[in-house]
Image: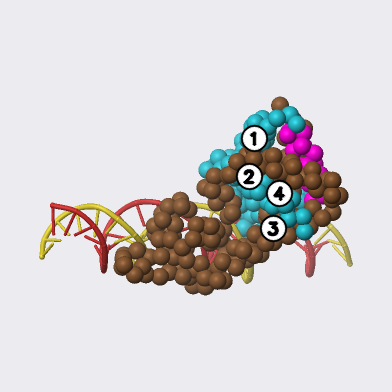
Chain colours: A brown, B cyan, C red, D yellow
DNA sequence: TGCGATGGTTGCATCCGTACAAGCATAAGG
DNA sequence: CCTTATGCTTGTACGGATGCAACCATCGCA
C-alpha cells in the first residue's frame, strides 16, 4: 500500500539518520551512549532525583549510580543534596554537560539546513509541507524509543 | 536560514527515529548493537573475508574474531575456509541471520506505511514529493555514519 | 627451499553496562 | 521513641567490546 511514498520515506529516513549519526559522533568521543542518554534526559526533563532519573531511563538505580559517578568525574553532571531531605540526591547537568547536548542538536540543525540550502525555494517548500504532514501523522515518538538511540 | 523548513525536518527526523528505534528493538533482544552492525554489513556487502569485514566496520580484527565467535555460536553467521586459500576465512550470514536483518527492515517499512495510511491522498503525495527532494539533496549517507546507529 | 609478508586467532588487560543483594542513612508514621 | 519504608550507594559478579602484542599457519616470491 502506497509503496512509492513508503519507499521515498525510507530513503529519506536513511539520509536523515546519516545526519543524526554525524551530529552524535563528536559527543560519543566524550561520553558513551548510555551516558549521553542520561545527559539528554537531564537536558529535557531538568534536574531530578537519582531514582526518578533511573526510572525514566529504565535502568536499575545502582547502575545509574555508577553511570553518574563517571559523568560527575568527567564534569558533565553534579550531584547535590536536597536541603529539606537528606536522603534524596538531586542530579543536574553542569554547563559543560548542557553544552554537550546543545552542541549535538545545533550540529544536527546545521546539517539539515545545509542540505536544504541546495534546494530551490519551491522544493524547500515541498519539503516543509511533506515533513510537517509526516510529523503530524507520526505524532511525538515515545521518549523511551528514542532513548535506545541516545536521543 | 530557512528556519521553518529546518524545524519541520528536525521534528520529522525525531518521528522517523522513533520508527527506526522500534524496528530495531526486537533484534536487540537477540544480539547486541555491535553484533547487529556486523550482520547489517554482511547483508549489504555479502559474504567476505574477516579482515575486510573488520575494516568495513572499523574495528580491530581481533575484536571481530570475538564478535563473530558469538554470532556463530548464536547461529547468525558461519565461517568457512576459502578453498584456494587456506589462510583466509570467509564469513557469511546464516538464513537465520539474514532473516533477522530482513525483519528489521520489513518492520520499519511497515511502521512507515502505517503512519502514511492515516494521511489523505493529497498529503501522502506531498510527503512523497518532499521526501524525494530531501533525499536527493542529502545524497546517500556515508555507510560508516549509519553503522553508528546499527543500520 | 627458505624468508618475508599476509590473514586470522589467542592471551591478556581494561573499561563499561548491567543487575541483585546487602547495607546505611534518613524520613515518616504510629 | 521505635519500627518500617524510602533513597541511594557499595559489594559482588558477569558478559560484551575493545585494542595490543604475540603467535601460528599459509602464501608468494626470490
Residue to which mark 1 is pinned: B115
Residue drawn where x is 73% and y is 60% of the image: A110
Q: Is residue B89 visible?
A: no
Residue to which mark 2 is pinned: B15
Q: Chain of mark 2?
A: B
| Secondary structure of the residue carrying numbered label 1 | helix
Sequence-first tag of 4 and 2: 4
Cα separation, mark 1 vs mark 2, equals 10 Å
Residue to which mark 3 is pinned: A108
Q: Are marks 3 and 2 on the same chain?
A: no
Q: Is residue A133 visible?
A: yes
Q: Is B111 placed above or below A14 here?
A: above
Q: Position of residue B5 (x, y in %)?
A: 74, 50
Residue to which mark 4 is pinned: B9
Q: Residues within 10 Å of mark 3 (few under 14, many from 20)?
A: many
Q: Is B61 placed above or below B15 here?
A: below
Q: Chain of mark 1?
A: B
Q: Residues within 10 Å of mark 1 (few under 14, many from 20)?
A: some
What segment carries the magenta color?
B123-139
Sequence-first tag of 1 and 4: 4
Q: Position of residue A65 (x, y in %)?
A: 42, 63
Q: Are marks 4 and 3 on the same chain?
A: no
Amino acid at each position: 500500500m502506497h509503496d512509492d511514498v513508503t519507499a521515498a520515506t525510507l530513503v529519506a529516513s536513511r539520509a536523515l539518520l546519516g545526519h543524526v549519526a554525524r551530529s552524535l559522533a563528536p559527543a560519543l568521543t566524550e561520553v558513551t551512549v548510555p551516558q549521553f542518554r542520561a545527559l539528554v534526559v537531564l537536558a529535557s526533563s531538568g534536574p531530578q532525583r537519582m531514582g526518578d532519573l533511573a526510572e525514566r531511563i529504565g535502568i536499575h538505580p545502582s547502575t545509574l549510580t555508577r553511570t553518574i559517578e563517571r559523568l560527575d568525574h568527567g564534569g558533565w553532571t553534579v550531584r547535590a543534596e536536597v536541603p529539606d531531605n537528606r536522603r534524596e540526591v538531586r542530579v543536574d547537568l553542569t554547563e559543560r554537560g548542557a553544552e554537550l547536548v546543545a552542541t549535538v542538536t545545533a550540529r544536527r540543525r546545521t546539517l539539515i539546513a545545509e542540505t536544504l540550502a541546495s534546494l530551490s525555494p519551491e522544493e524547500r517548500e515541498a519539503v516543509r509541507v511533506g515533513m510537517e504532514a509526516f510529523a503530524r501523522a507520526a505524532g511525538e515518538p515515545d521518549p523511551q524509543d528514542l532513548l535506545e538511540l541516545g536521543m
